[in-house]
Amino acid sequence: MVRSTANGDAVFCRDLVKTYGKGDTRVVALNGVNLDVHPGELLMLVGPSGCGKTTLLCVVAGILNRDSGQCSVFGRDFRSMGRRERSRYRGENIGFVFQSFNLIPTLSAAENVAIPLILNGVARREALRRADALLEKVGLGRRQRDLPSRLSGGQQQRVAIARAMIHNPRLIVCDEPTSALDHETGHHVMELLREVAVGPDRALVIVTHDARIFGFADRIAQMDDGRIVRVVNSPAEMSS
Ligand SMILES: Nc1ncnc2c1ncn2[C@@H]1O[C@H](COP(=O)(O)OP(=O)(O)OP(=O)(O)O)[C@@H](O)[C@H]1O
Ligand SMILES: [Mg+2]
């Protein structure tokens, strides 16, 4: 198990900087991000296209390295870990729903969902049994054996969400998790995510443009041009 920080944050970012490319093609995607996500919190992250939301999720989840600044998840900094420890920590503690789903095309829906469990040492049969049950919960009870190419965008998105939560990670980060879902399905998926991810030693960070799900947030962080410019407690405060 992981230890907690002195400050006890689920996610802690200070002066976080991330650039892509060099010279003329250099892009500053994160330009001094300060953000805390508290244990038990569902934080939504909003902001215009290109402002750095996906980049921030990737740095927080240890998929991308930062250039400078501080970043830790439940008190652990990926920079302090070796490659193997890092991937083990990520595999046990973080679930990621990618904007483009990133399902493995040659694996069935259930096999995709079972991956985190198998990587964490759960026997394949048991992992598939749990994947089947979770797919049932997200309304894909009859599609477990289908390849992603046989599924609609919204169905693929639910497979990606199931994959991010199956191993009960402490932190789930979701990049536009309801973009392909109708209102009712989106609502149901949010209820499920909330149930699984929000506990005293857990947290959920969701990038979204979907105003229909803002009501699920404990706080909403607004991002612009590589920075967090404002954090509000309710959707009503966003326009004020
Ligand atoms: N791999 C990359 N190489 C170079 N530049 C990149 C790369 N990924 C992102 N960028 C640039 O970094 C900036 C932030 O991109 P990012 O994908 O984080 O934005 P975003 O807020 O998630 O946008 P969207 O809402 O469209 O998904 C953009 O200017 C983008 O062009
Ligand atoms: Mg993005």
Image: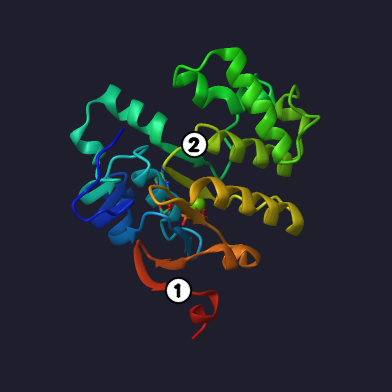
* Residue 82 x %, y %: 22, 26
Task: Choose the circle earlier in sequence order: 2 or 1.
Answer: 2
Does dot 2 land on a helix, a strand or a loop? loop
Tag in front: 2 or 1 = 2
Does the beta carbon at disc 2 come under 8 Å from ligand 2? no
Q: Looking at the image, which residue is at 50% across and 75% down?
A: 234
Left or right placement of residue 185 versus residue 22 in this view = right
Q: How is the image coloured?
A: rainbow
Amino acid type, callout 1: Asn
Q: Looking at the image, which residue is at 69% across and 33% down?
A: 135
What residue is disc 1 on?
233
Residue 83 against residue 40 in the figure, above or below? above
Left or right placement of residue 75 versus residue 48 in this view = left
* Residue 105 in sight in this render: no
* Residue 195 x %, y %: 57, 49
Q: Looking at the image, which residue is at 45% across and 17% down?
A: 121
Marks 2,1: beta carbons within 8 A: no
* Residue 170 x %, y %: 41, 42
Left or right placement of residue 21 versus residue 152 in this view = left
Q: Which mark is residue 65?
A: none
- Quadrant of res 157: top right
- Quadrant of res 221: bottom left
Q: Which mark is residue 168?
A: 2
Left or right placement of residue 100 versus residue 231 in this view = right
Amino acid type, callout 2: Asn
* Residue 121 in sight in this render: yes
Image quadrant where one finds the N terminus: top left
Residue 198 against residue 236 in the figure, above or below? above
